[in-house]
Amino acid sequence: MDELEKAKSIEASHDVRCAALPRFKQQIAKWGIAIPDTEPLVLDFGLGQFEAVGLIESWIANETAAGYCGKFLFVSDGQTCPTHHHKHKHETFFLLEGRVQVRLADDTVELAKGDQLTVPTLVKHCFTGVGPALLLELSQPCLIDDNYFEDTRIPIGGNYQDSEEGVRP
């Protein structure tokens, strides 16, 4: 199974997707930003709380063999991408629009349009929209099992794969 298919396992319900995608597309159009002509992932991380814990991802590339990944990450006002870390993936985020509050290890910073932030491997991080926000992620390839979520209810990633409940079909 490829990484995009694995990520789809934590997508929000059909009804949530149908409500979220038009808002996302309208905001992107308002900002005048072009995104890839692919179906975005509307992720609620399997928690069913999309408005509070979730984001919309639009993958540009995930070139495992070549060693790079690029994604657009969109969060609404007050929406959080949950706390996690990676054992292998090094990430750099560039804020294209809006503002986000980022928790990075034990520090909290607020990023505004044009700011960038590098997240080394093993550093716990999460981010929350302060209004709608769009980040560009540039990183090593996205390997779903290299996501280690603090919230153990999230049914994906390395910590889930290593648990007794985490046996994938």
Image: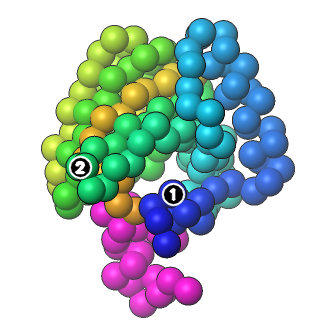
Q: Position of residue 38 (x, y in %)?
A: 62, 40
Q: Position of residue 104 (x, y in %)?
A: 25, 39
- Measuring 35% from the left and 73% from the top, which residue is drawn there? 159
Asked if the stretch drawn in magenta spans residue 154, the answer is: yes
Mark 1 crowdedness (10 Å alpha carbons): few <14, some 14-19, many ≥20 = some
Magenta span: 145-169
Q: Secondary structure at mark 2?
A: loop
Q: Position of residue 73 (x, y in %)?
A: 48, 34
Q: Secondary structure at mark 1?
A: helix
- Measuring 60% from the left and 9% from the top, which residue is drawn there? 32
Q: Is residue 159 visible?
A: yes
Towards the viewer: 105 or 161: 161
Give me the disc on residue 4: 1
Distance in Å between CA atoms under marks 2 and 1: 16 Å
Q: Amino acid at mark 2?
A: Gly
Compared with 43, 115 (above or below) is above
Left or right of 109 on screen, residue 1: right
Q: Amino acid at mark 1?
A: Leu
Towards the viewer: 124 or 14: 14
Towards the viewer: 127 or 137: 137
- Measuring 16% from the left and 44% from the top, which residue is drawn there? 120
Disc number lying in front (2 or 1): 2
Q: How many marks are shown on the rendered structure?
A: 2
Question: Which residue in the protein does label 2 denote?
Answer: 67
Left or right of 123 on screen, residue 129: right
